[in-house]
Amino acid sequence: MSDFKFETKTFYDALNQNELIGSKCQTCEYVAIPQRYICPACHSEKMERLVFSGKATLAAYTVIYIPPTEMVNAGYDAKHPYCTGIVTLEEGPRMSAQIVGLDLSQPQNIKIGTPLKMTIIERGPEGTSKKVLAFEPA
Amino acid sequence: MTKKLARGVAVVGVGMSKFGAFPDKTSRDLFVEAYQELKTSVQKGFNPNDIEAFYMGNFSSDQFERQGHLAPIVASWIGLSPIASVRIEDACASGGVALRQAVLGIASGQYDVVLVGGLEKMTDLPGAQVTDALASAADTMFEIPAGFTFPGFYAAMATAYMNEHNGDLDALLKVGIKNHVNGALNEKAQFGQTIPDVMAGKVAKAIQKGLPVPEWKDEMDFLRDPKANPMIAWPLRLFDCSPVSDGGAAVLLVAEDLVAKYTDQPIFVIGTGQASDGSLPERASLSHVPSAVGAGEQAYAMAGKTPAEIDFAEVHDCFTIAEIMATEDLGFFKPGEGWKAAMDGKTARDGEKPINTSGGLKAKGHPVGASGVAQVVEVWKQLHGTAGARQLPGTPRIGLTHNVGGTGQTSVVHIFERRF
């Protein structure tokens, strides 16, 4: 067993170091994000840390005009919508993330399958902003 | 091996409050309203002292009303103390899961008579806080930081669905139009208006205020107008979303050997199924709800019925796309055919598979914990031939309810049969 820690916090500690991490099962090779203590596929507990390449494609998306409080605080509203989606990582699993760098004026023109790459954005008012996972066109 | 109930369970009474926004009422007030109606619905009457347990679906009185531990309070409010009182929380599937737990409680032999409740009081909080409270039904550590809202999740599923099946977004609008037509015939519905009623109301208001009178060619034109029907989370607009609601619903279940004491017109629970799933990104498909397929398969197997044998269904249309996916997940239409069925009117009251004759969550309202129980109220009415102006012809024999929590982390399906 590695000394990899599986706590939820580990994921965000890595993200703060610009790393997107998950786990790979040493028994059946199932890849999960975020990391899991127990393999969802075979129940093995022999798990190792995996660093994702950050390459992905867009699997599903939306453009949000009525945001939740955290996004309102970050400056978004009906006149300043944002795109969020689900991406399929190069290594297989999917992840939710904000999608930046797209033209949102015609949401129907956003294409599922668009190649993306990981980026880390600062979200929220200056001084209280935090690092958040996002993807942008590759 | 197909699992069977160890003994039969029947519905002998139902009731629900009006759904809507009621600033002066708490969730317990609304549940009392539902329970009082239930009492009048039991053909031969019943003694409240017969009730041995209370299973109550409620998503989040903690967040909406700052009240935890709600089940014994509600039980006391209707005079049921000291019976076992349980609050079930599975997000928007809380009511359907409460029903299932009550069915299992009777089937096990532990109880003979059980009251099922569902209630939610959502309109006290400001809109953004309601959005935040509902978001806690998703994974707040790994999904919500992406900026998702619940309309956003279903919007993303809609893009995956339409992309996979080359579907037409107009199908979403058709679902809304149909559910408003049905809701307008339901005196308990939050929105008792068809879309043409809504259009006429806006025209009248503009004339009254001396403002420019809006003009729309038809319902579709109205629903495509961003001023009349603003975008919430593309491609879902306001009229694709179920409302924020207050309401309560109640169902009385008894063991089969006691049915004759209460009624000669029982509705039997012939199938029950429930399944769970991880958060949305973890699923093999984003264009349907795997847990709903699983729950449906369990319920069909137990009932010994096929999807073709279901006369009508109340499905979880929290968003219009959810109804389209549900009609496929339950096997009424093949994958990729649900949007076409909606376009072609196959799910209307006069269609081959009537869906959401009550108006659904969309028009009837969606007080989340109550919705799964209120679905049974509609099934009861249709099976008894007492659904009034929205009654299906020929008095149907078999109805189904489909109740989903979150984006499908929980799904619960029940099948009911009229036995009289």
Image (cartoon, rainbow, N blue to C red):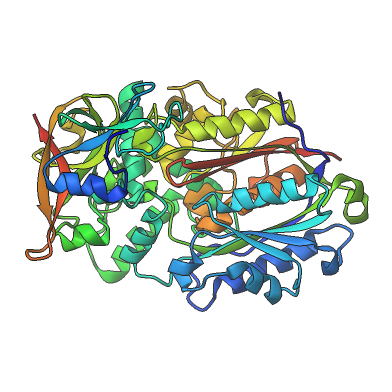
Residue pictured at 44% horizontal, 43% vertical: B177
Can residue B293 be seen here?
A: yes
Using the image, determine if residue A129 lies above or below residue B223: below
Q: Quadrant of the N terminus of chain A?
A: top left
Q: Quadrant of the C terminus of chain A?
A: top left
Apparent side of residue B80 relative to residue B93 in the rendered image (left or right): right
From the viewer's side, name the closer residue of A133 and B166.
A133
From the viewer's side, name the closer residue of B234 and B114.
B114
Image coordinates of residue A72 in percent, x first then y, are: 20, 61
Which residue is the extreme one toward the bottom?
Answer: B24
Residue pictured at 28% horizontal, 43% vertical: A5
Image coordinates of residue B367 in percent, x first then y, are: 51, 59
Apparent side of residue B376 relative to residue B153 in the rendered image (left or right): right
From the viewer's side, name the closer residue of B156 and A129.
A129
Using the image, determine if residue A41 lies above or below residue B371: above
Image coordinates of residue B69 in percent, x first then y, are: 57, 69
Q: Quadrant of residue B348?
A: top right
Apparent side of residue A96 relative to residue B371 in the rendered image (left or right): left
